[in-house]
Image (tube, rainbow, N blue to C red):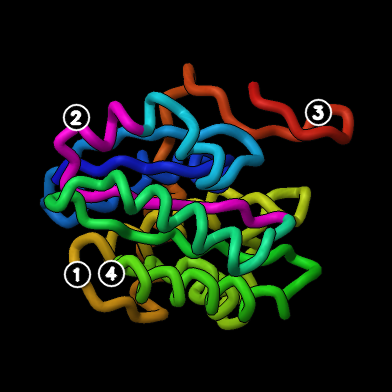
Amino acid sequence: MKVLFIGNSHTFVHYVPMRVKWFFEKQGKEIDIAMLTYPGVGLDFHIKQSQTYLNLLYGNYDAVVLQHNAHPFPGKESVISGGKAIAGICPEQTRIYLYMTWSEKNNPEGQKVMSEAYRELAEEINATVCPVGEWWWKIAEAYGEELYFADGEHSSVLGASLAAVVIGRTLLGMVIEKDELYQEAKEIAAKKQDPRMIDLIMKDGELDMA
């Protein structure tokens, strides 16, 4: 399976696509991954970038995973507008998946609005939702784990690993169950990424990449 990830820091922090690849390998499945991301942007940004067109129209992807702005969440119309624009240039053979993110740590009630927006978009463009945000809150409540980075918005390594397992299971058409999801996320979180890769850090009270 060849998969393109389009999104922002909630895709590139702790390299969610890499962790999806690790999950596939654990399942004995092959996957080729590519990523188009930029901090703080949504799908409305990506539809204006030439690399989006080149990759989708000529990249021969089996699937594309789309992720929109999350913090602050710009609302349902923004998600639907951006998602429909991207869907409009997806080849017929490229299956669309929607990476539903999580609301801020201090805004749990915001998840309902975000979830509804992604599900409505999925219905409009015949896409499949990867319900990361919904499982995020379930796992946090059940196990008391810290899924957030220090800023209360981005993911911890475990949070990114949880996202990857939800996405991986969705791509493979596998059932998602709480205990199994948690254990698989823990296993993925324990793996070490290449030390040459930059990642999100907190430096002098500010977010940075190093």
Residue at figure coordinates x 65%, y 62% from the top left: 146
Magenta span covers which residues? 53-71
Q: Quadrant of the C terminus?
A: top right
Three-letter amino acid code at the position of disc 1 = Gly
Task: Judge left or right: residue 153 versus residue 204.
Answer: left
Q: Nearer the viewer, mark 3 or mark 4?
A: 4
Q: Earlier in the sequence, mark 1 or mark 3?
A: 1
From the viewer's perspective, is residue 140 above or below residue 13? below
Residue 56: within the magenta?
Answer: yes
Label 4 CA crowd tier, 10 Å (few <14, some 14–19, many 20+): few
Q: Which residue is mark 3?
A: 203
Residue drawn at x 70%, y 33% is 201
- Element under disc 4: loop
4 or 1: tag closer to the N-terminus: 4
Mark 2 neighbour density, 10 Å: few (under 14) some (14–19) many (20 or more): few
Q: Which mark is residue 126?
A: 4
User: Residue 56, located in which quarter of the rendered image?
Assistant: top left
Task: Identify the residue position indicated by label 1 in the image.
Answer: 173
Circles 1, 2 touching at the beta carbon (< 8 Å):
no
- Front residue of 141/4: it is 4
Q: Position of residue 24 (x, y in %)?
A: 21, 51
